[in-house]
Amino acid sequence: MKIDNINSPNPRRTALDILDRYFESEIQLRVLFNEILDSSGLSGLDRRFAFNLVKGTVRYVIRLDFILSFIAKRKLESIDPVILNILRMGIFQLQFMDRVPSYSTVDESVKLAKSKSPYASGFVNAVMRKASSIDNVDIFLEGLLRKKKASQTEVLSIRYSYPEWIIEYWMEHFGREKTIKLCRYLNRTPGFYLRINKVLAGEGKSITEDLRSMGAASVGLKAPGLGDLQKDFTEVFGPIAVSAHGGEDKKFFSHAASISSASGLEKTKLFLEGLVTLQDISSQMAVRYFLDPRPGEKILDVCAAPGGKTSFMADLMENEGEIVAVDISDEKIKLLRQNISRMRSGIVKTLRADASRSDFLGDEKYYGYFDRIFVDAPCSALGTISKNPEVKYNKKKEDLERLSGNTIAILSACGPYLKKGGRLVFYTCTLSPVENQQTVENFIKNNGDEYIVEKVNCSPTRQGPCGDETGGQADNGDKAIDMQLEIMPYYLGSEGGFVSVFKKARSLSGNLGPEI
């Protein structure tokens, strides 16, 4: 589709161009933002408006289309796709962008329609005026759902704009209450997290003022602060974090800072000099506390692009040791190399290989070579919906078993490269029991007693996360905690995900391996 050449940048027209391309070709929004938004000539404020308008319209398209079909009184398939996108954008603004006056939204929608199809402007005007006259959209929507006699699954699908298969899948595994909570949190406009490169920041460079000027806020908290977080999170994370730090007086997430927007980050001095990078706190947590790399170790990082986790490993290792970072394509390897170069991760060697194939490293010297292996498994990415709303619509239920099988192949192919007693970390950015818990069960089942889920001792202390409400000793004394966590987005305001740690407990011959 031809993009209009205009003399003065217009955020709604730019948003419409992106939506037209997305719904026509299903190109990733990230690609379209880079192609269209970055060359639009819009000011920072208008860029943010267009960005949020596109993301919001895609995020709620099922809900928007359902309401629109009643207001327009015609099948959506009969509406010209460009006009349909104008109406979707308009109704989204009326429902969710309350800082924009209703009359302005109606007027701008009609202007857009005139520029695309003059004959459709009257239709757009009529639909938008009717939509703007609705006093309470939520009450209006619930009335439509009752009129339709929608099932429980349909109600949640339309209300929160998720395909029915995802609602059914989550309700089966998580229950209705948690499914609603997930839908709500993943529909929120997300915050963003920076990860500070402590190796470079420790080279006499004060970045405090630069971070403050970016509006960045420290995330760090100490052990007592865990008590303010969700119990089902802290009872797993607390002992693991304390164990990784070696004490409860240290600050957790000391590498992280939160920012409200990542727009323009790549042009800042801190980013260009490798002092910060954009990295969600869920993946920071997986590397820092579950992988827990140490200086001098040998690490294999699989499915490593774009390199945020790789460079974090190097930072935690103080650039002492060795990291072999693997990905499957030349394009991904190029991106990986660019990022580790920017972050000055000098101990990283990159390799293009298909990690689902046995002997993928192609060198016998790597058998039993690595202290730790990190597998960032390809997945359905349902935990990233807040940042990538199109993920809701581009996956199918049948994809899950295929992705789980591919992950098991990768984990199995990595196994021979791990030392006996070594740590194999499996991480995804999805909320999918088939891809997560089922994968763990099947991997262990397929490998006999060669692997176990790693455990950490939970020693209750006065301020630790394992004590009772009074801070005293838990009734059952010390206990072992599985190093496995489903990362819900409402725990830390992060992406959702899953992390599990395997220990290579026995060799193929059944002998216990040495501890690392």
Image: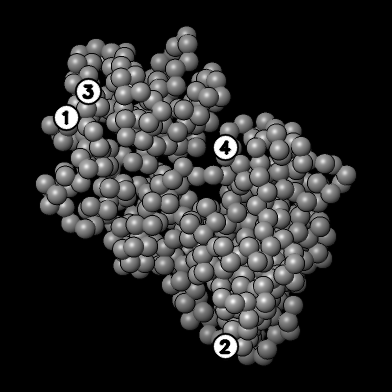
Q: Are marks 4 and 1 in contact (CB under 8 Å)?
A: no
N-terminal of the two: label 3 or label 1?
1
**Which of the two discs, 1 and 2, sits closer to the camera?**
2
Residue 353 at x, y percent in the picture: 61, 56
Badge 4: few (under 14), some or many (20 or more) residues near its Cα, within 10 Å?
some
Disc 1 designates what residue? 72
Q: Could you say whether the residue bearing mark 4 is in a helix, strand or loop?
A: loop
Disc number for residue 205: none
Residue 329, compared with residue 119, is above or below; it is below
Task: Please report whichever mark, 4 or 2, sits nearer to the chain's N-terminal start.
Answer: 4
Q: Position of residue 49 (x, y in %)?
A: 46, 28
Please tell me in which quadrant of the rendered image residue 507 appears.
Answer: bottom right
Does 228 sit above or below residue 11?
A: below
Label 1 sits on a secondary structure element that is: helix
User: What is the C-alpha distance between the residues marked 4 and 1?
Assistant: 36 Å
What kind of residue is marked 2? Answer: Asp
Give the residue at mark 3.
129
Q: Amino acid at mark 4?
A: Ser
Q: Which residue is mark 4?
A: 261
